[in-house]
Image (cartoon, rainbow, N blue to C red):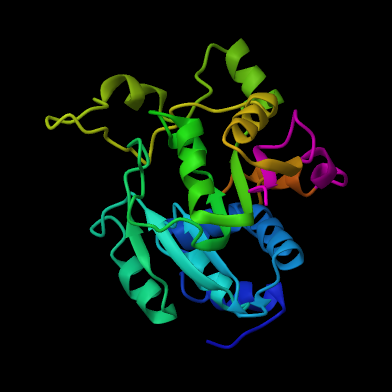
């Protein structure tokens, strides 16, 4: 794969893999573009792709179909993916990771030892994008497992929904739920017949305000480098009034505040 240093160029290559008329290509990628661009910018600044011994190693914990691993390899990173989704749910993942030479580790994020097959100190960096809200059993323990597979000084970029927004306050006033998958959470069992914890990708078990989130990250043994809020991007599938609001002057700035930022965004390190 051709190595690039231009994020817009790399994004264009990625977008060509996914048609605009699919959920992933037409909605997910476009709405998450600000988060993904911020991740890549921070990785390139804080963890350059080239090291003295080769390429920096970055693992995407919760890699879904492997798209972020693909994006990372375009900048020269050596990548790997970890996920709980079965191959039948994302059949394109195997081919994608094979094409870029990225190892894959199957995991259950709600087991106390979620990815035992991954050796300790394996990676220079890790991405945990919109995953932490899906952890039920032991969220701090899950972060400790991520720290274990990072080398000392390794970088972690974590994003997770911010529940302390003005839009959620309005939902509360209207008597609506604020956490994605509330009804499914009540309806679905959490332990299977064999006594193993079930991991559901479509349920947010818990969403965290930034103060509680940072406490959990620090309890897991990470040092926080930076914490901020990020907003969502625009897709053609959004309602017209949403697209209008997001085009207003100053909206991008508002989305970096707690009341309007839809995601917590944290950069942290495993101590040396």
| Residue projecting furthest to the bottom | 2
In the picture, measured across the screen, residue 102 lies left or right of residue 42, that is left
Judged left or right of residue 191, residue 251 is right
Name the outermost residue toward the right. Answer: 249
The answer to if 260 sits in the magenta stretch is yes
Residue 15 to residue 151: above or below: below
**Foreground pick, 33 / 215:** 215
Q: Position of residue 77 (x, y in %)?
A: 58, 74
The quarter of the displayed image where residue 242 is located: top right
Relative image position of residue 203 (x, y in whole percent): 39, 33
Q: Is residue 140 magenta?
A: no
Is residue 80 depicted above or below 74 in this figure?
above
Asked which quadrant contains residue 160, the reply is top right
Question: In terms of depth relative to the viewer, which is nearer, 105 or 185?
Answer: 105
> How many callouts does the rendering have?
0
Q: Which residues are magenta?
A: 248-272
Residue 10 appears in view: yes
Tell me, yes or no, if residue 236 can be seen here: no
Horizontal and vertical percent position of residue 29 = 55, 59
In the image, what residue occupies the spot 28% across and 65% down? 91
The image shows residue 171, relative to residue 201, as above or below, that is: above
Residue in the foreground of this view, choosing between 262 and 218? 218
Image point (51%, 32%), residue name: 140
| Image coordinates for residue 13, horizontal then vertical, percent | 57, 78
Point out the residue furthest to the front here.
272
- Residue situated furthest left in the rendering: 193
Q: Residue at x 54, y 28 (%)?
A: 207
The image quadrant of residue 194 is top left
């Amino acid at each position: 794969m051709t190595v690039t240093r231009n994020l817009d160029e790399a994004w264009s290559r990625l977008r060509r893999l996914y048609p605009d008329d699919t959920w992933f290509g037409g909605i997910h990628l476009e709405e998450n573009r600000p988060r993904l661009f911020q991740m890549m910018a921070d990785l390139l600044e804080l963890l350059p792709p080239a090291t003295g011994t080769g390429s920096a190693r970055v693992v995407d914990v919760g890699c879904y179909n492997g798209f972020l691993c693909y994006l990372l390899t375009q900048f020269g990173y050596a990548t790997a993916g970890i996920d709980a989704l079965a191959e039948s749910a994302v059949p394109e993942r195997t081919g994608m990771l094979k094409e870029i030479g990225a190892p894959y580790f199957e995991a259950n994020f709600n087991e106390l030892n979620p990815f035992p097959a991954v050796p300790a100190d394996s990676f220079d960096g890790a991405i945990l994008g919109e995953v932490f809200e899906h952890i039920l059993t032991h969220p701090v323990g899950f972060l400790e497992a991520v720290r274990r597979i990072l080398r000392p000084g390794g970088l972690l970029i974590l994003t997770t929904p911010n529940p302390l927004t003005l839009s959620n306050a309005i939902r509360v006033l209207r008597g609506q739920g604020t956490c994605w998958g509330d009804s499914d959470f009540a309806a679905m069992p959490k332990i299977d017949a064999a006594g193993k914890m079930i991991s559901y990708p479509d349920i947010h078990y818990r969403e965290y305000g930034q103060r509680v989130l940072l406490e959990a990250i620090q309890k897991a043994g990470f040092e926080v480098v930076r914490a901020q809020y990020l907003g969502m991007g625009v897709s053609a599938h959004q309602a017209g009034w949403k697209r209008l609001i997001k085009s207003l002057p100053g909206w991008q700035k508002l989305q970096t505040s707690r009341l309007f930022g839809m995601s917590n965004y944290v950069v942290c390190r495993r101590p040396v």
